[in-house]
Amino acid sequence: MSLGSFIKKQFIDVLQWNEESDGTLAWRHPMEDFEIQYGASLTVRDSQMAVFVNEGQVADVFGPGMYRLTTQTIPVLTNLKNWDKLFESPFKSDVYFFSTRLQLGRRWGTPQPVTIRDKDFGMVRLRAFGMYSYKLADPRKFFTEISGTRAEYTVDELEQQLRNLIVATMSATLGGADVPFADMAANQLLLSDRMCEAMTPTFERYGLTLDNFAVESISLPEELQKAIDARISMGMVGDLAKYTQFQVAQSVPLAAQNEGGLAGVGAGLAAGLGMGQVMMETMRGGTSSTPLAAPSPTAVDEPEARLVKLKTLLDKGLVTQQDYDAAKAEILKKLIG
């Protein structure tokens, strides 16, 4: 090896990171056996920061700009190295570049259902998914807490750690949100804000700034989802008394076409109304002071009772005069024999 090659290998005049691809947060300049020439040029781009590390200790941090490395531009490193100010010599140090660009579209989700307490359904196991974005703001903290002396540290490596932190924080936030699951869909924006507020100190601890956090979907196990669907259906029914009357009115024309005609409508109407009352009392929690008696089969089956029911239907316009006369004749025929 020639003397020129040896000298060329030993000294670095320009320090910079071209950042040729996405996905890298920290990159160590390849020093090998090189030394940095006194007065060398350091270029830090707008989306970067640079850190000088001496024997594992962060010495100096440089923001965007162009620097000529002298005892004036790196005072902390100068103090650590104890350079003789009268002798401007090369120096050995590790240089790390950090990307401070905004990392967008990072996805998070619960790999396993998270159990929380819900005031409507008790213990609930749910899944949640969403997106977040962040950027590296303090390279000193990031180097100390996360990346260390690795030659390269990527976004994907960091995401594995952040995902666990997010899931843990989400469990605590959902558990203390005091928002019923049935209302969470309408409060996803509020939930996202609470998650962002809770996660911010954790991100700052590692030298990161959380830019945005979004909860896109919250889902339940299938069996609990069916229970919620049933509750929604009951709410859509509304007034059970009116719903029962509507069903009876709908069944009258069909009953006239079946065997027995309208003779059994009275019994069906009485049973339907009785059932509707029982259902309403059940939904009210049984607060009525007057118990409801089940309709007597004997009273309902008597011809006189059937005629009274038929007359009531006729007066209310639920049956026609022709249907009423036909049903009345059939009842009288059975009564007389």
Image (cartoon, rainbow, N blue to C red):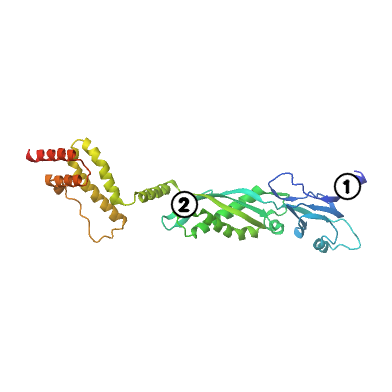
Residue 229 point in image, percent of width and height: 40, 48
Label 1, label 2: how far apart the Cα atoms are: 64 Å
- The residue pinned by badge 2 equals 125
Amino acid on which disc 1 is placed: Lys
Image quadrant where one finds the C terminus: top left
Nearest the eye: 25 or 332: 332
Percent position (x, y) of residue 173? 52, 58
Q: State the residue in front, 69 or 292.
A: 292
**Rendered residue at 26%/53% (across/down):** 278
Query: Mark 1–mark 2 contact, CB under 8 Å?
Result: no
Residue 243 horizontal/vertical position (percent): 30, 48
Question: What is the quadrant of residue 170 in the picture?
Answer: bottom right
Most extreme residue toward the left is: 336
Q: Residue at the location (23% across, 41% down)?
A: 252
Which kind of residue does numbered mark 2 sit on?
A: Arg
Which type of secondary structure does the marked residue at label 2 adopt?
strand
Q: Position of residue 232 (x, y in %)?
A: 39, 49
Q: Quadrant of the N terminus?
A: top right
Extreme-right residue of the structure: 3
Q: Is residue 320 above or below residue 159?
A: above
Q: Which mark is residue 8?
A: 1
Query: Which residue: 86% across, 50% down?
Result: 10
Is residue 223 at all visible to an observer of this figure? yes
In the image, taking residue 177 as reference, residue 135 lies left or right, namely right
The quadrant holding residue 283 is bottom left
